[in-house]
Amino acid sequence: MWHQNGLCQENTIPIRRTKKEDVFRASSIRRYGKKTHLSTPNPSSVDPAMLNENGHQHAIAYVEGDKYYGAKATINVWQPSIQQGNEFSLSQLWILGGSFGQDLNSIEAGWQVSPDLYGDNNTRLFTYWTSDAYQATGCYNLLCSGFIQTNNQIAMGASIFPISNYGGSQYDINILVWKDPKEGNWWLQFGNDYVLGYWPSFLFSYLADSASMIEWGGEVVNTEPDGSHTSTQMGSGHFPEEGFGKSSYFKNIQVVDSSNNLKAPRGIGSFTEQSNCYDVQNGNNGDWGTYFYYGGPGKNPNCP
């Protein structure tokens, strides 16, 4: 949308201005532009005690057990409503390396609505990275050094338009992240035409070699306002069983193999902490390849 006000010259890149108010909305200057610790879904350990403690909920599809060198997806774009300013709703892919301990490496890209981060409820393109499980390293977009942008037409954190309507027009974006076999850097492509930039290999430990897990899906923050579940929506705010035009989807999900080829993910699993709040349903067909519907309304009679 920022193109309405002009374009960037050659050898420059667009950077979203950080204002004083943006920083003041953060819990602290040190935490500005960062996710909270433990915000990556770990399908192998659902400790109910952790649910409320860390407040992040997910509905995802995932693969593990191989070496992965990238991932791709076409992601349906919506504008979920957010109950509290310090909550968010996002839909993204995760490229993960290492264990879910203190040294988790993660590269992430997708769309998000985050009033705290951006000061509005627009749906925005974003990236994220960390090499120590969201503790000290990494950030969103260009809010710290790390991701190196090379494209002057697409801005990190820029609003995406148009967005899908319930029962109406549907819009989606293509995201591809892949590891350059020669240099070892992780590159990001948006759509079919825009290579946006890269995460240098040296930022990471495990991901310097390859990823051990790929995840695709939605994440929300549930701060339990008023002691009950948040009504912050994930995806379209509707459950998977409503299907196309009503529930949000990821389609044509693929992984990059060691020969630098895109292929369908093998042995895909799904995971959600509380399926009566947000759910996920996998499928496969000729047009959409491997796909899933995901999301939900959050608070409802079955999710008090």
Image: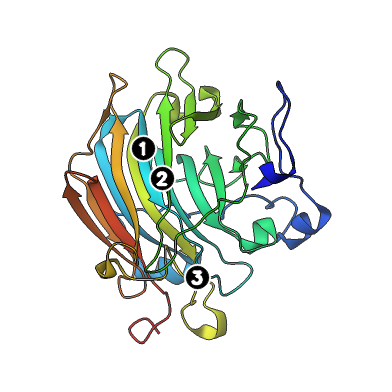
The amino acid sitting under disc 1 is Lys
Q: Is mark 2 on a helix, strand or loop?
A: strand
Residue identified by numbered label 1:
72
Label 2 amino acid? Leu
| Viewer-closest of 282 and 39 | 282
Q: Look at label 3 and name its amino acid.
A: Asn
Residue under the point 72% across and 50% down: 30
Of 81 and 221, the residue lying toward us: 81
Q: Name the residue under label 2.
A: 93
Report the quarter where the C terminus lies. bottom left
Which residue has dot 3 on it? 222
Label 3 Cα neighbours within 10 Å, binned few <14 / some 14-19 / many ≥20: many
Residue 295 lies left or right of residue 26; in this view the side is left
Q: Which residue corresponds to the image point at 31% horizontal and 75% vertical from the top-left?
A: 276
Mark 1 or 2: in front is 1
**Total number of numbered discs in the rendering:** 3
